Each structure stands twice: as C-alpha cells, then as structure tokens.
C-alpha cells in the first residue's frame, strides 16, 4: 500500500486538535485559578498553533489575497461584491473597541469569571516561598526565637503585630510590627464611589479598585489619622491613649518603631530575640487584620452608627489573635500558635473576644504559625 503525505490534511488536523486543547485550557483559566501546568500547556499549545497558522497562511496565501479584495471574480461570471471581508473586519474591530471601552456585557462576563476564580480558594496554590527577616534588637541578650508564618489563601495586604507577654497578660516587648501601624502612617483616604452600595464580600476580587473606590491623600494624615480598629488587642497593650480616648501608636518616636518593618506579603521566617531574660513560661502572640474582607455578617452596613467601623478604614471582619504558650522547662523546641479570639470590630476595647462564629476569610489569612525556640 502506497503512502503519501498530504500537507493540507496535516495542517487542518493539527489546527483542529491544537484548537481543541486551547479551548479546554481557556475555559479552565476563565473559571478557575489556573495551575502552572494549565498555564504552561495553554502557552505552548498557543505558540504551536501560531506556527501551524503561519504554515497554513503560506500554503493559502494566494486565496487569502483574493479574500481581502472588495470585488472577486467567479469562474465564468462577472465580479461580485465580497461581503465576507468587510463583515470579518467589522466583527474584529467591534470586539476590540467594545473591549477597550469596557462594554457592559463584556465587563459582566469578565467579572463573572473573576468571581469564579476568586471564590475557589482551594484552587489557589499556596506559594511555599519565604521571606527571611532578621529583626533582632541591638544588644538583646534574651531568648532567640524564629517565627515561621505560612500565609493562607486570603492573605493579601494585612496589618499584623507579633509580641511577647507573660501568662498574666503583661506586655513584655514587640517582636515585629508592620510599619504603617507602628508609625500610624495611614495617609490614604478611601471613599466609595456609590455611597449607597453595601459590601458583603471583598469587592477587589471581582472589580478593579478604581471602579469601586476613590483613593486620595487624607488631608488629616499629617495629624495622624486614627485606625484603632486595626489591631486593638495589641494597641491596648501599648497603653498609649490619645486625648480622645483612642489607642494608637505615637508615630516615628513610638516605642514600637524600632521593631517595625515593611508589611511582608509572602510567607516569612522572622528571627528575633528578647531584650532581657524571659520567664520560664510566657506567651508569643500574633494579631492580624485585613481591610475590605467583608462577609454576610460583617457587611459594610453592619454598624451604621459606629463612626470607626463605618469610616474610611474599611476594617470589615475584626482582627484575629493567635498565641502559643512557651514552656522553656520542657524539651520542646517548636510551639504551634492557635487562634484564641478576635479584637473589637472598631477598637473600642482591647479585650480578647471569644465569638468567632461570624468570621470567615479572616480565619484563613494564615495557614499556620510555628514558634521555634533556640
């Protein structure tokens, strides 16, 4: 049986098969957080399809030139107006222009896909890459500790503080505090474009920031705009109270500025050390909070008469507090931290509130935290 290679058949079959794979990966990337495998397959198949398409154009360049003409001549007849070319051109231009101007149906389709991807946290891979930070105080002579924090699926732009205290709750010293909190540098004023809009989920997962909020420098920022709802348990431990009764740091001269650093947006390994000798048994605590993480209970209209909760800080779900009890008399070196409560939703007190049933994504900012004692 004789064999022959039909290049046109090969190209047509290749285009069909590659396009089928590309269609499947496109759907997966639209509805789900894509994995590295899907993204790599989509890219490689797309590049291969492009090469095959160039081969197809080479073999069909003559007919393609005819398709671009406004009038074509059929065999044995007069020339006729080619309606295919202007229709194809019009369709292409329409899709591009309507996408650029964010045509509502197109934007709705994009938003729907974003909501599907954002809502499936199980599909978002936790990146096991760590930042290493040494925040050891100068002349510290006490116990050396390493805090191993692995971020959770909803960890994005949180404020957090890690500190030491006695079993009785007496504050010992900070280990790490995000710089914005330590210096009280909350200078950006955020306002809703639609004052009547109510949030029951994080609006940034579905829409662009500029579509929902207006961001501007707060004219009151030079007077240290207050964010007592950010980490109320920690801030009350500092016992720095303003004349208006609000607990906040005092800026660059505060006692915690020496322990501050940039907000780490990845999992991290923090090395630090106690300034002085610690008790045999003590606590390491972490308080973390993230703005805009609204849910059905902590919606943007939950406390309309609370000027802090309903202000421009958008605290949403309150802070979550973790701790580990360190017993240096045992042989144990690693101490996992556990959730022990939450802060007040608008920072009115520094109590550790035990009610956690209305928290959702706030409990998944952190995957796990482990304290290592050296």
Image (cartoon, rainbow, N blue to C red):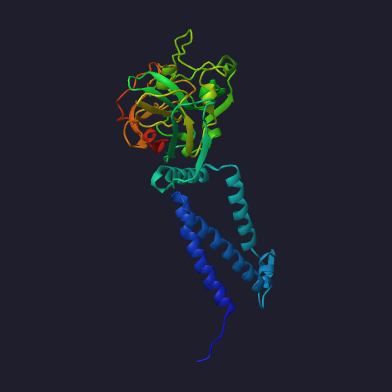
Q: From the image, which quarter does the C terminus lie in?
A: top left
Residue sitting nearer the eye, 144 or 125: 144
> Where in the figure is residue 20, as x and y percent of width and height?
48, 64
Which residue lies at the image location 55% right of the left edge and 18% below the top edge?
251
Instruction: Give the residue at x 30% y 25%.
Output: 354
Q: How many labels were placed on the picture?
A: 0
Residue 304 image position (x, y, % from top left):
40, 19
Q: Residue at x 39, y 22 (%)?
A: 165
| Left or right relative to 50: residue 307 | left
82 or 337, nearer to the observer: 337
Up-down: is 177 above or below 115? above
- Residue 331 vs 66, above or below: the answer is above
Residue occupying the point 67% across, 75% down: 77
- The image position of residue 247, as x and y in percent, is 45, 15
Residue 309 visible? The answer is: no
Relative side of 205 to 94, left or right:
left
The residue lying toward the viewer, choosing from 182 and 296, is 182
Q: Residue furthest top?
A: 243
Q: Is residue 218 visible?
A: yes
Residue 259 x %, y %: 52, 25
Q: Is residue 293 positioned above or below 171 on the image? A: below
Q: Nearer the viewer, residue 344 or 132?
A: 132
Location of residue 172 by image quarter: top left
């Amino acid at each position: 049986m004789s064999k022959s290679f039909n290049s046109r058949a090969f190209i047509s079959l290749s285009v069909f098969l590659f396009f089928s794979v590309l269609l499947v990966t496109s759907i997966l990337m639209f509805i789900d957080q894509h994995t590295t495998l899907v993204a790599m397959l989509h890219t490689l198949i797309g590049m291969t399809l492009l090469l095959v398409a160039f081969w197809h154009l080479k073999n069909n360049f003559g007919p393609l030139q005819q398709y671009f003409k406004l009038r074509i001549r059929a065999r044995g007849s007069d020339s006729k107006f080619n309606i295919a070319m202007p229709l194809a051109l019009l369709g292409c231009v329409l899709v591009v222009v309507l996408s650029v101007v964010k045509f509502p149906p197109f934007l709705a389709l994009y938003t729907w896909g974003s909501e599907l991807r954002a809502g499936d946290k199980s599909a978002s891979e936790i990146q096991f890459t760590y930042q290493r930070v040494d925040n050891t105080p100068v002349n510290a002579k006490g116990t050396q500790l390493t805090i191993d924090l692995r971020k959770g699926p909803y960890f994005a732009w949180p404020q957090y503080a890690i500190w030491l205290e006695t079993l009785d709750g007496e504050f010992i010293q900070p280990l790490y505090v995000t710089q914005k909190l330590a210096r009280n540098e909350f200078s950006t004023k955020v306002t809703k474009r639609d004052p009547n809009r109510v949030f029951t989920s994080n609006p940034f997962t579905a829409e662009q920031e500029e579509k929902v909020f207006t961001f501007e420098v707060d004219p009151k920022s030079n007077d240290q705009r207050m964010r007592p709802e950010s980490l109320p348990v920690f801030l009350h431990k500092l016992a720095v109270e303003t004349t208006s009764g609000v607990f906040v740091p005092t800026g660059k001269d505060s006692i915690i500025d020496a322990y501050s650093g940039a907000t780490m947006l990845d999992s991290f390994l923090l090395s630090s050390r106690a300034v002085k000798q610690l008790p045999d048994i003590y606590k390491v605590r972490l308080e973390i909070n993230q703005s805009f993480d609204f849910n059905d209970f902590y919606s943007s209209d939950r406390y309309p008469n609370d000027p802090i909760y309903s202000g421009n800080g958008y605290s949403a779900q309150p802070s979550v507090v973790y701790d580990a009890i360190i017993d240096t008399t045992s042989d144990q070196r690693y101490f996992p931290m556990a959730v022990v409560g939450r802060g007040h939703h608008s920072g009115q007190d520094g109590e550790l509130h035990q009610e956690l049933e209305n928290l959702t994504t706030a409990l998944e900012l952190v995957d796990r935290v482990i304290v290592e004692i050296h």
